[in-house]
Image (cartoon, rainbow, N blue to C red):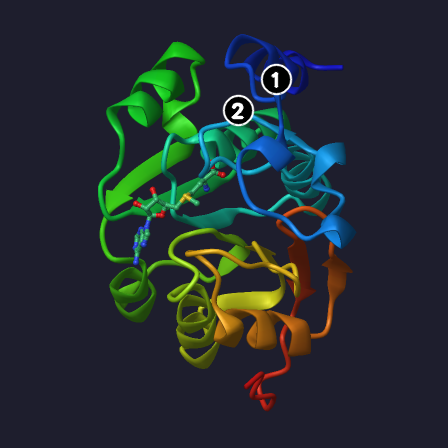
């Protein structure tokens, strides 16, 4: 195992990404089995089981240009950045309305800053005006009311590369609470791909057909 692969495990341990049962952080329907998932207990951070999967997906797909919408404390950013470091190439654009100091500090602390550009922007504006390379990988994790629009505008503008891997968080069809969005659940439910329904839910979509309107 190379050093960058080991780094992700070190970050999980040092930042205590798996110390609290997910069921303590969010309301869940019993069928979501949230007691089997783990997190930091801070609310926004993605469950470590899904962070591990995202880290592995980036290592397996070898994307060059990557997007994360919604960085918050940066745990998804670190999972992706470690995989980029392990791959030896790639650049992540991590977009948040208000990027946190902690994120930049952790990127520097773990030697990952060169792999990530932290962008202070509204996610939909970013997606609607991006003029760089097509994204090969995208993790949609901003406001649930914005994520379908982010994906849709990138797709319509041809800014998702053929075969791009798109990962949507919080897609459980049983999701409820203040941050739930029925439109978002319908959008991700209708998209062809891999549905992981447990805990807050994750949907993985690849190479969306240009003619399909998910709504
Ligand atoms: C669920 S948290 C992201 C968690 C992070 N991806 C992780 O895995 O640890 C959502 C973040 O999205 C940001 N956000 C919400 N709406 C946004 C928008 N329209 N554009 C950019 N960022 C947004 C919030 O500031 C918050 O930091």
Q: Residue at x 26, y 37 (%)?
A: 99
First along the sequence among labels 2 and 1: 1
Where in the figure is residue 95, as x and y percent of width and height? 33, 47
Say which of 115 and 204 sits in front: 204
Q: Residue at x 45, y 29 (%)?
A: 42
Answer with the quarter of the image where residue 118 lies: top left
In the rendered image, the quadrant that contains the C terminus is bottom right
Distance of label 2 from label 1 (alpha carbons): 6 Å
Where in the figure is residue 174, as x and y percent of width and height? 65, 62
Q: Secondary structure at mark 1?
A: loop
Where in the figure is residue 157, as x and y percent of width and height? 40, 77
Q: Which residue is mark 1?
A: 19
Where 191 sits versus 178, above or below? below
Q: Residue at x 26, y 67 (%)?
A: 129
Dot 2 surroundings within 10 Å: few (below 14), some, or many (20 or more)? Answer: many
Whether residues under marks 2 and 1 lie with C-beta atoms below 8 angstroms apart, the answer is yes
Asked if ligand 1 lies within 8 A of label 1, the reply is no
Say which of 132 and 107 sits in front: 107
Q: Is residue 215 left or right of residue 3?
A: left
Q: Which mark is residue 40?
A: 2
Where in the figure is residue 166, as x and y percent of width and height? 59, 59
Q: Is residue 69 left or right of residue 131?
A: right
């Amino acid at each position: 195992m190379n050093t960058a692969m080991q780094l992700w495990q070190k970050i999980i341990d040092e930042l205590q990404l798996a110390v609290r049962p997910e069921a303590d952080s969010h309301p869940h329907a019993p069928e979501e089995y949230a007691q089997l998932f783990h997190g930091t207990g801070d609310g926004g951070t993605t469950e470590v089981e899904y962070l591990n999967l995202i880290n592995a997906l980036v290592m397996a797909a070898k994307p060059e240009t990557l997007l994360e919408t919604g960085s918050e404390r940066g745990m998804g950013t670190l999972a992706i950045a470690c995989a980029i470091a392990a791959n030896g190439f790639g650049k992540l654009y991590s977009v948040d309305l208000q990027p946190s100091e902690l994120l930049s500090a952790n990127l520097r602390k773990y030697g990952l800053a060169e792999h990530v550009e932290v962008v202070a922007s509204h996610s939909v504006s970013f997606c609607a005006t991006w003029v760089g390379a097509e994204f090969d990988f995208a993790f949609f994790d901003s406001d649930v009311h914005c994520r379908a629009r982010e994906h849709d505008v990138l797709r319509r503008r041809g800014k998702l590369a053929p075969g791009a891997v798109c990962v949507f968080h919080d897609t459980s069809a049983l999701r409820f609470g203040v941050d739930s969005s029925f439109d978002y659940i319908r959008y991700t439910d209708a998209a062809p791909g891999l549905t992981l329904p447990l805990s807050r839910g994750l949907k993985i979509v690849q190479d969306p057909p240009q003619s399909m309107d998910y709504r």
